């Protein structure tokens, strides 16, 4: 097959790589088909923790026989010292709620800079359990909370107390002992803002690194608490978890609409994330111009087989997700068989990856296509890991006042043709609106002219805002020709924000989601999936079109693994085979 790729030397400058167009990448269905990769924040964090051999010690463990009390871990990372403080509380089962609007939890936590003094501990103890109702100071980097998966947690404790390991299938059905519903940072409630974190605390100077570390430490505590309670219940017969079972246990997460506006309100950051991912894909495709060796093809076959098993082990009550998982498995099984049969023949052939991607795009589901892209990225850590330090960008949106109005009109016609193509005269095109509830300011999605709250609408319908701005620009240009943007904004100040966005985003590859986000049938779950994939989660389990459960750090190395040889291959976790007599 003819291909424009010629030599790997030609692509030594990544700015020349042929990236996929935004018209393909920035569609909701494709964004909602992303999976974690080597550039995901959990993966990056774990690599740094293991290779830099962070030292994490428990300096306070004051739990009663029921597991309630205070625990402090001290972390000596490469560049600084931090403390992870946990408060374990009794929670009436009737009050256990995974919604962000809940006000009671089994655990509340704080990640703090430096060591925690007794005075600071008392301050944290008075405020951290209150979460949004409390206040902290800039020594706190992250505030979080979590609830037990009661059935699984109690089952594990009971099994260990009776001297045997829990059944792996029972663990696999859920995958975690606790699930978190929020991890707040970046200045909320008085915490350290992002500027302080990325300038002063280099260990967490990547997007959401501190938040992901908080979830990692929650996982560590959840295992220690379960083992502690088992030994408290039965000192004579109690045992600890098998090491492979510990690695298989992750942390659960429930994510709802609160995460969706982030992708819309931070288009420069989203552009950076997606551009780095797309650059990684283009880099590995380009490297196949000189041929693929047999060992690399074998590794792809092995990882494909692992994903097939991983998808088969996902338990979800959502029929649509179950059907999608089944269909993707079937397509990946075809890929696996093809690699098994053709792998040796493909060795040293040119353009194997571009041919594979092209075939997938012509014959297979979008999610299968994006899974293949993820698997290809995994094959070349030496080529793609460098992009992990380029996942952040300062978000500044500025008006270019000297631009002529006629040029701005042309810019919108070129860069926002997708927005102009939407027919907003149709009622369904503006049948939904985004707003914040009075309860905890939680984002919600309402039905236009049916649900209350339209007066509090959030400006997330970017396509609609561009359309309104464009129509106003055209009318203004007809009546006041040869004027610049400054003149337009003076006359139309309400459009200054969307003008700044259009002019800024026109300089990027990606960023704006090319869909009508106020359509009556919009699927916000695609937005959630996209952001969660960059976090690095797995096992998506939609509970509706508005929220999804997932698993974090399942299969990741334990703290006890930090000084051991490390292979970063814990993505797509599968059930371990335990050697139990």
Image (cartoon, rainbow, N blue to C red):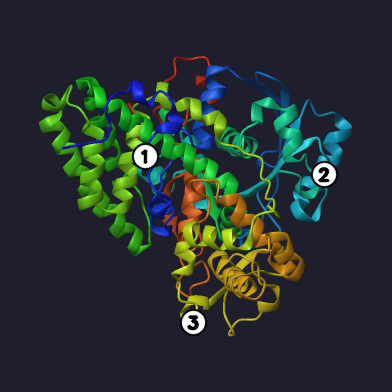
- Residue 297 placement, left or right of 271: left
Q: Which mark is in front, 2 or 1?
A: 2
Q: Position of residue 77 (x, y in %)?
A: 66, 21
> Would you call the spot at circle 1 few (<14 residues within 10 Å), some (14-19), or many (20 or more)?
some
- Residue at mark 2 to residue at mark 1: CA–CA distance: 40 Å
Q: Residue at x 21, y 51 (%)?
A: 362
Left or right of residue 27: residue 200: right
Disc 2 target residue? 136
Quadrant for the C terminus in the image: top left
The answer to whether mark 2 and mark 1 are in CB contact below 8 A is no
Q: Nearer the viewer, mark 3 or mark 1?
A: 3
Q: Secondary structure at mark 3?
A: loop
Residue found 60% across the figure and 64% down from its top? 460
Asked which secondary structure carries label 1, the reply is: helix
The earlier-in-sequence mark between 3 and 1 is 1
* Residue name at image x 65 percent, y 31 percent: 205
Q: Is residue 446 above or below residue 557?
A: below
Mark 2 crowdedness (10 Å alpha carbons): few <14, some 14-19, many ≥20: many
Name the residue carrying label 1. 168
Would you say residue 238 is visible in this rendering? no
Mark 3 or mark 2, which has the lower sequence index? 2
The residue positioned 37% from the left and 30% from the top of the image is: 283
Q: Position of residue 419 (x, y in %)?
A: 49, 66
Q: Is residue 41 left or right of residue 92?
A: left
Give the x, y percent position of residue 571: 40, 35
Q: Nearer the viewer, residue 238 or 284?
A: 284
> Looking at the image, do the residues carrying marks 3 and 2 touch, with CB atoms under 8 Å apart?
no
In front: label 3 or label 2: 3
Mark 3 lies on residue: 425
Residue 500 picture location, percent across and down: 66, 56
Q: Quadrant of residue 112?
A: top right
Asked if 544 appears above or below 528 in the picture, the reply is below
């Amino acid at each position: 097959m003819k291909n424009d790729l010629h030599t790997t030397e030609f692509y030594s400058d990544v700015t020349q790589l042929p990236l996929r167009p935004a018209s393909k990448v920035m569609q909701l269905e494709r964004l909602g088909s992303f999976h974690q990769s080597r550039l995901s924040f959990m993966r990056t964090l774990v690599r740094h923790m293991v290779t830099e051999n962070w030292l994490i010690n428990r300096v306070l463990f004051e739990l009663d026989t029921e597991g309630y009390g205070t625990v402090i871990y001290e972390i000596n990372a490469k560049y600084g010292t931090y403390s992870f403080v946990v408060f374990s509380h009794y929670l009436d089962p009737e009050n256990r709620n995974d919604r962000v609007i809940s006000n009671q939890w089994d655990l509340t936590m704080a990640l703090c800079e430096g060591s925690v003094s007794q005075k600071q501990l008392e301050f944290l103890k008075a405020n951290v359990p209150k979460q949004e109702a409390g206040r902290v100071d800039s020594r706190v980097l992250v505030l979080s909370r979590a609830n037990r998966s009661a059935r699984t947690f109690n089952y594990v404790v009971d099994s260990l107390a009776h001297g045997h390991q829990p059944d792996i299938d029972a663990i696999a059905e859920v995958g975690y002992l606790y699930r978190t519903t929020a991890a707040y940072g970046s200045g909320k409630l008085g915490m350290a803002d992002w500027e302080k974190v990325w300038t002063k605390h280099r260990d967490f100077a990547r997007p959401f690194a501190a938040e992901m570390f908080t979830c990692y430490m929650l996982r560590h505590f959840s295992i220690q608490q379960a083992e502690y309670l088992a030994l408290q219940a039965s000192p004579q017969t109690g045992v600890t978890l098998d090491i492979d079972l510990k690695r298989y246990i992750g942390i659960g997460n429930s994510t709802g609409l609160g995460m969706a506006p982030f992708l819309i309100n931070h288009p420069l950051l989203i552009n950076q994330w997606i551009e780095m991912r797309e650059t990684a894909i283009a880099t590995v495709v380009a490297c196949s111009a000189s041929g693929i060796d047999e060992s690399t093809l074998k590794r792809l076959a092995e990882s494909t087989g692992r994903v097939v098993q991983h998808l088969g082990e996902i338990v979800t009550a959502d029929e649509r997700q179950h059907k999608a998982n089944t269909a993707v498995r079937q397509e990946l099984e075809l890929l696996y068989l093809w690699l098994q049969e053709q792998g040796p023949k493909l060795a040293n052939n040119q353009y194997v990856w571009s041919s594979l991607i092209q075939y997938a795009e012509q014959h297979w589901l979008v999610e299968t296509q994006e899974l293949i892209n993820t698997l290809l990225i995994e094959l070349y850590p030496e080529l793609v890991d460098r992009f992990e330090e380029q996942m952040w960008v300062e978000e500044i949106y500025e008006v270019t006042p000297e631009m002529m109005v006629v040029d701005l009109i042309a810019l919108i016609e070129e860069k926002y043709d997708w927005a102009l193509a939407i027919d907003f005269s149709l009622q369904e095109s503006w049948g939904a609106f985004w707003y914040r509830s009075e309860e905890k300011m939680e984002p919600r999605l309402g039905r236009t002219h049916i649900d209350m709250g339209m007066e509090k609408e959030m400006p997330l319908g970017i396509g609609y805002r561009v359309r309104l701005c464009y129509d106003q620009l055209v009318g203004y240009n007809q009546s006041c020709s040869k004027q610049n943007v400054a003149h337009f904004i003076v006359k139309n100040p309400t459009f200054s924000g969307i003008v700044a966005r259009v002019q800024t985003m026109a300089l990027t590859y990606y960023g704006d989601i090319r869909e009508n986000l106020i359509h009556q049938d919009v699927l916000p779950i695609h937005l959630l999936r996209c952001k969660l994939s960059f976090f690095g989660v797995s096992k998506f389990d939609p509970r509706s079109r508005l929220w999804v459960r997932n698993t974090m750090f399942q299969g990741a190395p334990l703290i006890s693994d930090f000084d051991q040889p490390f292979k970063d291959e814990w993505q797509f976790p599968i059930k371990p085979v335990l050697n139990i007599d």
